[in-house]
Amino acid sequence: MTYDALEMALNDWQILFAEWGEQKFRAAQVCQWIYAKKAFTWQEMTNLSKALRDKLHDNIAMNFPIMIRQQVSRDGTRKYLWHLNDGARVESVLLNHGGHKTACISSQAGCPLGCVFCETGANGFKRDLTRGEILGQFLMMEKINGADINNIVFMGMGEPLLNEGNVFSAIRSLNDKNMRNLGARHITISTSGIAPGIEDLADFEIPIRLSLSLHAPNDELRSKLMPVNRRYPLQSLVAALKRYHDRTGERITVEYALIDRVNDSPEYAYETAALLDGLEPYINIIPFNPIPSKPELKRSSQGRIKAFCAALTEMKIEHELRKERGSDIMAACGQLAGASA
Ligand code: SAH
Ligand code: SF4
């Protein structure tokens, strides 16, 4: 096979069809079959001639992640384990809330950043995912569930801004009117704080949303919890966030997982408010999800969570205590390992 369907952007289709002497609109037609109608075989594309379908069949592979396990949580959250072409395995999560569906997608097989509280980080790094492997997770979940998914968040395995080229390319296709036509405001990248990547996002032509995994408001504690902070300390991170905020006018969501007696005292809430002053952040407080590799890390008590939130309220920082989802099947934030067990 010369080509792989999901690895091709709209422009690649147009160039190929021009080479084949096909009309230009055929490119959009094929993309609509794949991205909107979820036709994953050429023969289903009934408004193309038999000759063109055969030519596509002979030249272009339809590689999709192969589902090897689906788990359903008590709260309706679904977790999928995928097998990729080279044997790598990644997980995705589908959240269901009030009729709205959100896909939580992986951008890398594993993660090289090793945050101490994250199971993905504890299992090492294998490789970046291709744009097709990123899109494939989303399209397969729509196909399996027979329904459109309303939102995509890059909060699965891996650091999306370390695989920027493929992630941005996948987002362009999700957003393209001739492909999946998913609105920019329904797409979110979550980052551990890759400052240059945040700068690139400020200049990205599609105004998607940004979520920052903060978890500690000073360099000393943050570098202990998230080694990436040594490379991009808070000062450079806040400068990049300010630029993103100024250029896009978007509010930034901040994730803060409360780990018992590690980062959950009210002093840290005051420090967080001071650090993010002027950025109009919206903070998601996540009760820490226990992970097998770090039994010593515990979730904060209700009392400590309340005290932390009260300090944020006092500082007039908008925040929400995130409801935990999917933890009974290890599908909650930070619990994805891509394991085969
Ligand atoms: N690498 C990116 C994208 C992964 S998103 C990032 O770190 O932002 C996964 C989210 O879950 C991040 O906000 C991460 O900080 C958070 N997380 C990781 N481990 C967690 C845990 N054990 N409990 C709660 N949240 C966790
Ligand atoms: Fe990687 Fe994000 Fe997990 Fe850190 S929290 S190890 S950056 S996936």
Image (spheres, rainbow, N blue to C red):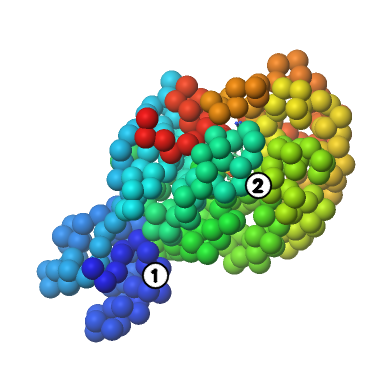
Please name whichever residue, 294 or 46, is drawn nearer the observer in this view of the structure.
Answer: 294
Kindly identify the amino acid type of the residue bearing the numbered disc 1: Leu
What's the residue at 65%, 60% (across, down)?
197
Residue that label 2 marks: 192
What's the residue at 64%, 40% (across, down)?
115
Q: Is residue 249 visible?
A: no
Q: Quadrant of the N terminus?
A: bottom left
Residue 213 x/y as whole percent: 67, 42
Residue 46 x/y as whole percent: 17, 62
Kindly identify the amino acid type of the residue bearing the numbered disc 2: Ser
Q: Residues within 10 Å of mark 2 (few under 14, many from 20)?
A: many
Image quadrant of residue 78?
top left
Ligand 2 within 8 Å of disc 2? The answer is: yes
Ligand 1 within 8 Å of disc 1? The answer is: no
Please name whichever residue, 55 or 260, is drawn nearer the observer in this view of the structure.
Answer: 260
* Label whose residue precedes the other's in the sequence (1 or 2): 1
Residue 172 lies left or right of residue 161; in this view the side is left
Q: Quadrant of ligand 1?
A: top right
